[in-house]
Image: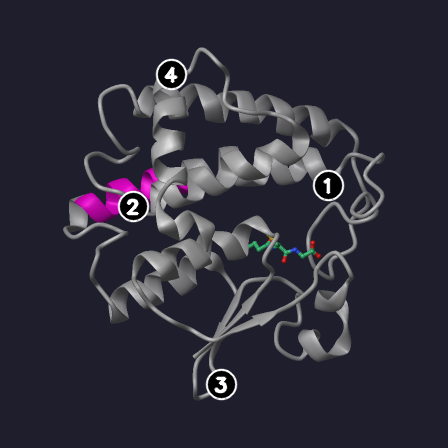
């Protein structure tokens, strides 16, 4: 297997943390998104949409979505379980994972990529090859959705150590990456959200968070 990565980007980081939690050692190929390497011919032959991460199998099969990569690896290496162990648990984790992804990751992406003061990305509202220009109103929607993300994060953490219960899961991975990504638009966990702050300190101190 081969993992196409970008060390500063939040979606590759989700997969990297997942891989580290599983204790796997998958060779990595670093692609420089800021320098535009993901839009050059060589990488487009790997992923025509120009997006990272990508997991490549030894037979050349490739997956270009973080959750597909994680689901594939969970099937191959079930321990420790990060996506749930029973049908009910798996469905619950899927529900929460999507909320963290849409309200946290995608909202930050909207707020960041549509800011026309942001020279590197303002001409590309969408990541990858699809050229949609910045839409200024999406900055406000992104910022407001991040408020929703933080509100629910605090609620989910009121009575449990991790977002989906007693065990660290993919939900925590996506939320952690979203919180760190939101620093790019200067929207941190609100000071009064004590459960979220306690959780953030805990999950950030896991060795996988440095992966
Ligand atoms: N839905 C994809 C999103 C992947 C994505 O947006 N990746 C970003 C990095 S976080 C990217 O490749 N950006 C390239 C660009 O900005 O051109 C996933 O979950 O893996």
Q: Mark 3 or 2 closer to N-term? A: 3
Task: Assign the magenta stretch its main secondary structure.
Answer: helix
Q: Please, what secondary structure does the residue beneath circle 2 have?
A: loop
User: Do labels 4 and 1 touch, CB within 8 Å?
Assistant: no
Q: Mark 3 or 1 closer to N-term? A: 3
Residue behind mark 1: 113
Tell me the tag on residue 194: 4
* Circle nearer the viewer, 4 or 1: 4
Tell me the tag on residue 190: none
Question: Percent position (x, y) of residue 177?
Answer: 49, 42
**Label 2 packing within 10 angstroms: few (<14), some (14-19), many (20+):** many
Front one among 80 and 127: 80
Residue behind mark 3: 60
Q: Is mark 1 within 8 Å of ligand 1?
A: yes
Membership of 15 in magenta stretch: no
Residue behind mark 2: 169
204 on left or right of 49: left
User: Do labels 3 and 4 touch, CB within 8 Å?
Assistant: no
* Circle nearer the viewer, 3 or 2: 2
**Label 3 packing within 10 angstroms: few (<14), some (14-19), many (20+):** few
The Cα atoms of the two marked residues, 3 and 4, are separated by 46 Å
* Circle nearer the viewer, 3 or 4: 4
* Rendered image quadrant of residue 163: top left
Q: Mark 2 or 4 closer to N-term? A: 2
The Cα atoms of the two marked residues, 3 and 2, are separated by 29 Å
What residue is drawn where x is 33% and y is 39%?
95
The Cα atoms of the two marked residues, 2 and 4, are separated by 20 Å
């Amino acid at each position: 297997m081969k993992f196409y990565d970008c060390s500063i980007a939040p979606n590759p980081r989700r997969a990297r943390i997942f891989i580290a939690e599983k204790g796997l050692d998958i060779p990595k190929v670093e692609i420089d998104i800021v320098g535009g390497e993901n839009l050059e011919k060589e990488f487009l032959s790997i992923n025509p949409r120009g997006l990272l991460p990508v997991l490549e199998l030894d037979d050349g099969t490739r997956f270009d979505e973080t959750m597909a990569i994680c689901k594939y690896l969970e099937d191959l290496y079930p321990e420790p379980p990060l996506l749930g162990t029973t049908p009910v648990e798996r469905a619950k984790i899927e529900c929460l994972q999507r909320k963290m992804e849409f309200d946290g990751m995608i909202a930050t992406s909207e707020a960041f990529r549509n800011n026309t003061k942001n020279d590197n990305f303002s001409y590309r509202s969408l990541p990858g090859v699809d050229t949609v220009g910045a839409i200024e109103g999406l900055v406000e929607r992104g910022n407001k959705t991040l408020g929703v993300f933080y509100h629910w994060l605090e609620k989910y953490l009121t009575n449990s150590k991790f977002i989906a219960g007693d065990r660290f899961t993919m939900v925590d991975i996506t939320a952690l990456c979203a919180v760190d990504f939101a620093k790019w638009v200067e929207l941190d966990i609100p000071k009064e959200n004590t459960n979220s702050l306690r959780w953030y300190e805990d999950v950030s101190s896991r060795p996988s968070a440095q992966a």
